[in-house]
């Protein structure tokens, strides 16, 4: 089992995000995970993401800063059928690690 990586802050943002989604689901799957189609990811709890995940994985520890970084890397907000919001980038796909 892999855990959230404190050494990951020097790795480029998309790779850190991919690592989080692919390798840390036991710890954070209830906070952030892949959408069932694998084309986007869903943030289930932004407050817990900001409190428990961002400080360990990313230089920016505020949720709004995390969102700005997503948009800067070309992610788009996507509404899903169950009224959840996910974030999608055509180059960022489940299993494409």
Image: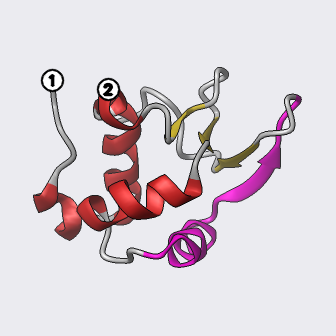
Image point (64%, 21%), residue name: 36
**Res. 56 image quadrant:** bottom left
Residue 44 in which image quadrant? top right
Specify the quadrant of the image occupied by residue 6: bottom left
Question: Is 11 part of what is drawn in magenta?
Answer: no
Q: Which region of the structure is painted magenta?
A: 62-81
Quadrant the N terminus occupies: top left
Residues 66 and 71: in front is 66
Secondary structure beneath dot 1 equals loop
Q: Identify residue for label 1.
A: 1
Percent coordinates x, y for residue 26 in the rendering? 32, 26
The residue at which mark 2 appears reads as 26
Q: Quadrant of the C terminus?
A: top left
Dot 2 and dot 1 residues touching (CB under 8 Å): yes
Q: Position of residue 81 (x, y in %)?
A: 88, 29
Q: Is residue 94 above or below residue 45?
A: above
In the foreground, 45 or 4:
45
Q: Residue at x 39, y 38 (%)?
A: 28
Question: Alpha-carbon neighbours of circle 1 within 10 Å: few (<14), some, or many (≥20)?
Answer: few
| Precedes in sequence: disc 2 or disc 1 | 1
38 left or right, relative to 83: left
Q: Element under label 2?
A: helix
Numbered badge on residue 35: none
Which residue is depicted at the point 17% across and 38% down? Answer: 3
Real-space Cα separation, disc 2 to disc 1, in angstroms? 8 Å
The location of residue 13, given as percent across then percent down, is: 37, 64
């Amino acid at each position: 089992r892999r855990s959230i990586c404190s050494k990951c802050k020097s790795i480029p943002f998309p790779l850190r995000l991919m690592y989080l989604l692919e390798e840390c689901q036991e710890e954070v799957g209830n906070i952030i995970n892949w959408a069932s189609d694998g084309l986007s990811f869903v943030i289930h709890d932004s407050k817990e993401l900001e409190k428990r995940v961002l400080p360990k994985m990313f230089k920016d520890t505020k949720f709004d800063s995390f969102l700005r970084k997503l948009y800067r890397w070309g992610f788009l907000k996507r509404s899903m059928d169950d009224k959840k919001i996910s974030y999608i980038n055509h180059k960022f796909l489940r299993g494409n690690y």
